[in-house]
Image (tube, rainbow, N blue to C red):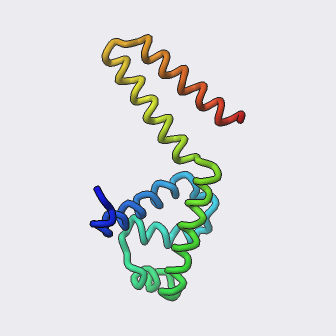
């Protein structure tokens, strides 16, 4: 779908992506950043509602969300943990599908390629 014609789609996708990245990088966020991000992404609270809930200004909430999102996207660009996980999940799903079709040699080839790809990422 073209996000330019549906701005709310882009907004929703961004929230989902932030929630997904938080699963991988929450440990590098402060407790306050985690709380604000959770209220925004998971609880679907407005900036004003988050401000009242956390006792900080609406502007501080906005700034924290921007900085936190920037940090998460930067970490993913640098480390790639979420995309690596997704590639592994997709590869394993392909292997299972090949096994279900009785194509054990295809599944073996897919697993070998997946393992080699992962090793190459570990040791550039």
Residue 3 drawn above or below residue 85: below
The quadrant of the picture occupied by the C terminus is top right
Task: Give left or right: position of 63 versus 48.
Answer: right
Can residue 77 be spotted in the picture? yes
Answer yes or no: is residue 32 visible: no
Where does residue 7 sit, x and y in percent of width and height?
Answer: 32, 69
Occupied quadrant, residue 120 = top right
Give the camera-side residue of 30 and 16.
Answer: 16
State the residue at coordinates (56%, 60%): 73
Location of residue 61 with respect to 21 vertically, above or below: below
So how many labels did they put on this image?
0
Residue under the point 64% across and 52% down = 78
Pick whichever, 2 or 98, lies toward us.
2
Whether residue 40 sits left or right of residue 76 in the image: it is: left
Horizontal side of 85 relative to 74 (left or right) equals: left
Q: Position of residue 68 (x, y in %)?
A: 56, 69
């Amino acid at each position: 779908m073209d996000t330019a014609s549906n701005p709310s789609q882009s907004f929703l996708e961004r929230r989902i992506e932030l929630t997904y990245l938080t699963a991988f990088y929450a440990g590098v966020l402060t407790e306050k950043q985690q709380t604000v991000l959770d209220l925004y992404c998971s609880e679907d609270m407005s900036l004003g509602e988050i401000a009242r809930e956390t006792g900080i200004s609406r502007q501080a909430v906005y700034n924290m969300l921007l900085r936190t999102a920037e940090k998460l996207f930067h970490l993913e660009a640098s480390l790639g943990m979420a995309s690596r996980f997704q590639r592994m999940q997709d590869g394993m799903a392909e292997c299972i599908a090949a096994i279900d079709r009785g194509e054990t040699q295809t599944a073996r080839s897919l697993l070998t390629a997946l393992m080699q790809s992962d090793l190459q990422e570990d040791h550039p």
